[in-house]
Amino acid sequence: MRIISGIHKGRRLTAPKNLPVRPTTDMAKEALFNILNNTYYFDEISVIDLFSGTGNISFEFASRGCEKITAVDTHYACVKYISETSKQLDFTIDTLKADVYKFLEKSPSKATVIFADPPYDFDQEKFQKIIDLVFNNNLLEDVLKHCSENTRLCIAVDITLPNEQIQTKTVGDWRNTKINLNKKPCIFLIGN
């Protein structure tokens, strides 16, 4: 895996082979960050990276200047790898070994961006539960102060189900935008 931009641009990271993950591809990550790069000042936002795995997304945010990142995963080896790599790169990523649902139910923290990249075998009900917990617990912060001019605020939910089966919760003038990340279920929530 590779950090695409920021202070560690081009740096390759090698996660242990025994981690139960497959990192987001460079192409998918680049598509995601092209959208975000034109929307946010990274040094002013906070991020929650759910199902963080290798920390690929967290490392990219940190390299681009984000200092408030929480990486959540259930696997000890993943959390340990993210924590150790974060220290080596002098990033301020808080790592947490926790069940994502329990974390969302009890989290006192809000974030500008909540990124969830669940396992491939994730079903629609589990997927929807994440969205519901984020909204019911008011975990997205007001991001107007973090955005560049003329920003279109949105929730992006990318899943491989047909459009008529996608159920997202919208509030106010939220818009739905889809991005294809590895052609697998992925939730990308941006606050308003």
Image: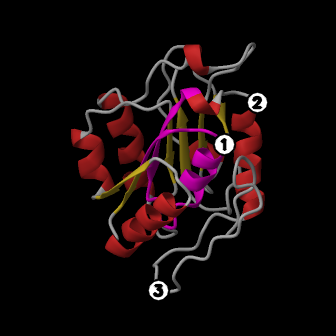
User: Left or right: 37 with respect to 127?
Assistant: right
SS state under label 2: loop
Residue placed under numbered mark 2 in the picture: 38
How far apart are labels 3 and 1 at the CA level? 28 Å
First along the sequence among labels 2 and 3: 3
How far apart are labels 2 and 3 at the CA level? 36 Å
Residue placed under numbered mark 1 in the picture: 64
The amino acid pointed to by label 2 is Asn
* 122 within the magenta span: no
Which residue is depicted at the point 64% across and 48% down?
63
Residue placed under numbered mark 3 in the picture: 18
The stretch in magenta equals 44-70
Which of 2 and 105 lies nearest the eye of the viewer?
Answer: 2
Residue furthest to the bottom in view is 18
Q: Is residue 118 visible?
A: no
Which residue is depicted at the point 44% across and 70% down?
81
Disc ID at residue 94: none
First along the sequence among labels 1 and 2: 2
Give the quadrant of residue 2.
bottom right
SS state under label 3: loop
Question: Which x, y percent locates residue 108?
Answer: 26, 33
Decide: is 10 above or below 141.
below
Callout 3: 10 Å neighbours few (<14), some, many (20+)? few
Decide: is 17 above or below 108.
below
User: Left or right: 167 with respect to 64?
Assistant: left
Location of the N terminus by quadrant is bottom right
